[in-house]
Image (cartoon, helix red, strand yellow):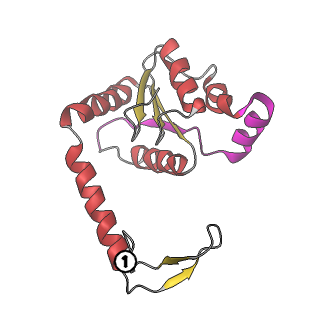
Amino acid sequence: MPAGSHGTLPTVPDREAGGTVEVVPAGEVIRTHLLTVVHLLQEVRESDVVPFVRALERARDEGRSIFTMGNGGSAATALHMTNDLARATRPGLPPLRVTCLSANISLLSGLANDYGYDQVFVRQLLDRVEPGDVLIGISASGNSANCVNALAYGRQRGAVTLLCSASTAAR
């Protein structure tokens, strides 16, 4: 039996590679995913998270803006983070001013067409980002040119920049 083969699982045609692939039961997929998430969360160090939280608290207390960005699934994560931050204010605390730079597809596609996809986030930050603002880039590789460029621009303007990435080789 080949490595990784379960031997008794049903198969379906694989149109891209030819041949067939095994159908893994949903329960096994879910169990594997949850174990992976638990493992990843156990690797997160509090010392890595505290500066991130402090930057958000400072932005809130000083009335600064927070900008999130990402591509593909990371764009969805950035929008979800924006939603959570926008409504996470406790009574008595000022609200967070948060914007997702990935959310407006009309603006994104127009900027990509006119200036190139590597500039879609920088162009949205022109004349908006100020010292003390927070820019959060989400990129699995850490090398998405549009996120890297926006974070570099933000640093030049005095913003606090944070990259959420699965890679230790991020730019």
Which residue of the protein is positioned furthest toward the front in this rendering? 1
- Picture coordinates of residue 85 (x, y %)? 40, 44
Residue at (37, 23) in percent of width and height: 62
Q: Is residue 64 above or below residue 10?
A: above
| SS assignment at label 1 | loop
Q: Is residue 108 above or below residue 135?
A: below
Which residue of the protein is positioned furthest toward the right in this rendering? 114
- Picture coordinates of residue 115 (x, y %)? 76, 28
Q: Which quadrant would residue 53 be assigned to in this image?
A: top left
Q: Is residue 105 left or right of residue 129?
A: right
Residue at (74, 36) in percent of width and height: 112
Residue 92 painted magenta:
yes
Q: Which quadrant would residue 36 be assigned to in this image?
A: bottom left
- Picture coordinates of residue 7 (x, y %)? 37, 83
Residue 48 painted magenta:
no
Residue at (37, 70) in percent of width and height: 4
Q: Which residues are magenta?
A: 91-116
Q: Is residue 142 visible?
A: yes
Residue at (69, 40) in percent of width and height: 108
Q: Is residue 23 above or below residue 149?
A: below
Could you tell me which quadrant the N terminus lies in?
Answer: bottom left
Front residue (pair 147, 127): 147
Q: Which residue is mark 1?
A: 1
- Picture coordinates of residue 48 (x, y %)? 25, 32
Front residue (pair 46, 90): 46
